[in-house]
Image: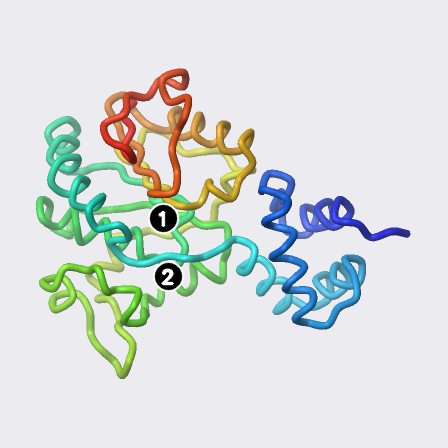
Amino acid sequence: MVYDYDYFVGEVYKLTQIDLSSYKQNQMKRRIDALIARHKIKDYGEYIAVLKKDKDMLNEFVEYITINVSEFYRNPEQWKFLTDDCFPELINRFGKRLRIWSAACSTGDEPYSLVMALSKYIPLSQIKITATDISNEIIDKAKIGIYNEKSIAAVPEEYKKKYFVKNGSFYQISDEIKKCVEFKKHNLLKDPFPKDYNLIVCRNVLIYFTEEAKDETFRKYYDSLCKGGMLFIGSTEQIINYKQIGFTRRSNFFYEK
């Protein structure tokens, strides 16, 4: 039997429910081939056999292909627009108990940034953010909340002092911030999307999707927002057909339903 990439994609879906066919093939195949070479595995068939037997290898594979690159307050000027313009408007529109979803949240940098930014207007006791990711391993890391100096470089100084404790070369985020975030597992390409959110944040994730998968996901985000809700996307992304979907563009990275 020839163990080609299509075979591998089918077997990965059976194992993980991750649909690699919805990711850009050349980009994803390069990443997977590099991982296989690193382990000195001869082909896709042998690698699938290893993934079926070895849970640690399977966890490593899922974490590797889901591309977990994140940092606090990534692209600070966009966070400034969110904090100074969007949050006051959303609070005025929906009240202080905003429903916020941080999708594909990676190691927690983004939802924890949302909590800190929102604390400018709302007491922490009233902030509750839903954060989801496809990887259980990554969610576990997010719940622990330990970060290096590079990850928190863009955090405003007042929040660094208030909400982080330095331990050697690492920083532990405070429990009072962690309590504001509920982490759940969610597959953007497979699972149903939750409804009635005032703000959805999903940044620098969909760039790895095919154009078809990207369009479908943006449409699902639109359906997940309540009228007047906003979608915050990454600096490497844009919604070409936002008017066709039903969005109004508020800035390059903010879209309103």
| Residue at mark 2 to residue at mark 1: CA–CA distance | 10 Å
Q: Position of residue 239 (x, y in %)?
A: 39, 29
Query: For mark 2, does the 10 Å Cα neighbourhood hold few (<14), some (14 to 19), or many (20 or more) residues?
Result: many
Q: Earlier in the sequence, mark 2 or mark 1?
A: 1
In the rendered structure, the answer to whether residue 7 lies left or right of residue 178 reads right
Which three-letter amino acid code belongs to the residue tagged 2?
Ala
In the rendered image, residue 219, in percent from the top left (x then y), is placed at: 44, 25
Residue depicted at 52% across the width and 37% down the height: 191
Is 216 left, or right, of 146 in this rendering?
right
Q: Looking at the figure, which quarter contains the C terminus?
A: top left
Kind of residue indicated by mark 1: Ala
Rendering coords of residue 213 (x, y %): 54, 33
Q: On the rendered structure, is 191 left or right of 152?
A: right
Hey, which residue is sitting farthest bottom in the picture? 168
Q: Position of residue 143 (x, y in %)?
A: 36, 62
Give me the residue at 29% from left, 35% from top. 253
Q: Is residue 223 above or below residue 105?
A: above
Residue designated by label 1: 131
Tell me the SS state at disc 2: helix
Residue 85 or 130: which is nearer the viewer? 85
Answer with the quarter of the image where residue 121 lies: top left
Q: Which residue is mark 2?
A: 142
Q: Residue at x 37, y 42 (%)?
A: 202
